[in-house]
Image: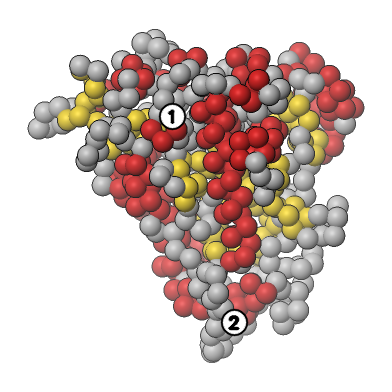
Amino acid sequence: MVKFDEMYTRLPYEFFTHGAQIRDHYKIYDEWLARQPGDMMAKRREEAEMIFRRVGITFAVYGAKDEDGSGTERLIPFDLIPRIIPAHEWAALERGLVQRVTALNRFLHDVYHDQEIIKAGLIEADQIARNAQFRPQMVGVDVPNQIYSHIAGVDIVRAPDAQGNGEYYVLEDNLRVPSGVSYMLEDRKMMMRLFPDLFNAHHVAPVAHYPDLLLETLRASSPPATADPTVVVLTPGMYNSAYFEHAFLAQQMGVELVEGQDLFVKDNFVYMRTTRGPMRVDVIYRRVDDDFLDPLVFRPKSTLGCAGLLEVYRAGNVSICNGVGTGIADDKSIYPHVPQMIEFYLGEKPILNNVPTHICRRPDDLKYVLAHLKDLVVKEVHGAGGYGMLVGPASTKAEIEEFRQALLANPGGYIAQPTLSLSSCPTFVESGIAPRHIDLRPFVLSGKEVQMVPGGLTRVALKEGSLVVNSSQGGGTKDTWVLEMGARPVAQAPSQSQSQSSAARS
């Protein structure tokens, strides 16, 4: 299988080639790395782990997902070698992301209003009506600026084409409560702390202003009559896997972090309890799934939301970001239709391609998938976190047969995709520096305009050969550097430090 590495032009790695096998945008980094002492990376990794632990940058894993029994609270492994993206590549990615998220928001408005895309025959009516993520309570409800997904996390992978050149694909859209942006910000702070000389040698586009852009986006989504909107972050609480992120973003934006019990409805408005009495809330950045938002409408036993919240939302007296019902647009059964959406709503050809996808609810697609299970990745349409999926080439015959039965029992619950040879990036592991597969999650903000910080969260599959980058299954993160347009980094003068030993780079 053809492979593509972000830094090296050929695999396996051959070190000390004096830049001959290094892509242009990595050459200064490679020269710097070659000048470092052999134990430098290991020492810096220990330092990073100590700082992350002190700050409390963790995520939680529960129950059966705690596969190695290491406990609920974990540090996400942080890799010291950055993923570097040249300016022209990012510019194309950004255009594609703006186009895609704009079309998805148009689709969401259409689904809950005129349903023109169904009338045009591009999507079947029952794909919407019978989808667990469709919220009939939102039909006919107008939301500010017709924006439903204010914060989108779009997962992008890179794979070689027939000529071996890296091509970007959208793997999935996350439009409900996408997480991970706090790790993007903390990874950057860590790299700047550990390697300030590298930032002097490269023109890396900043990401630290993300909380400002997020707050701007949230305030822009407030009810029209609100002059100075009050924004809060709604968290399920400290036992949620992403609680660190909820608290971090609230602190960074300078807004209150609240739980459902802190909110109440009165006279068709939402208020939060404070030490100085009730305060009206205008915008809720919710990190709680739809099902738990309002016990009067969704799950009656939920204690994570606020009773009566949906009525206030439907009346236009509070904004919820992301909007209720956005899950219909990021469902994996809808994903194959996004290129058609772009053409239908925008009259444009998609800039970013989907991964070719077989829709198992279609008899012909199902027949093909069943015949090629050992070669495909099969996913649950409602699955997340890398669970509920079959990676054919990495599965046993017994696992494949078990999945075959599940597929036959509920074909509409699955899609299938070819096993892509995901791009790799040099990663510092126990044996030294070795290639590991990566993806990228940029965070796209939609308010009065669609904007994002350059880059995103690069996740890395730390297990050799693994394609699963999710943190709950052993994945780690890297800092993502987008080199600024028109800026050419200037090489630093060689230092007196010895060249890195071959043991550290093998």
Q: Secondary structure at mark 2?
A: loop
CB atoms of marks 1 and 2 within 8 Å: no
Rendered position, 213 above or below 367:
below
Question: Mark 1 or mark 2, which is nearer to you?
Answer: 1
Q: Secondary structure at mark 1?
A: loop
**Looking at the rendered structure, which numbered label has been put on residue 323?**
1
Q: How far, Cα to Cα, is label 1 from label 2?
A: 50 Å
Q: Is residue 254 left or right of residue 395?
A: left
Sequence-earlier tag: 1 or 2: 2
Quarter of the image for residue 350 reads top right
**Looking at the rendered structure, which numbered label has been put on residue 387?**
none
Task: Identify the residue shown where x is 34% and y is 47%.
Answer: 216
Q: Is residue 306 left or right of residue 291?
A: left
The three-letter amino acid code for the residue at tag 2 is Arg
Question: Which residue was labeled with disc 2?
Answer: 35
Task: Identify the residue shown where x is 77% and y is 46%.
Answer: 420
* Front residue of 385 and 271: 271
Quarter of the image for residue 51 reads bottom left
Q: Is residue 292 left or right of residue 455?
A: left
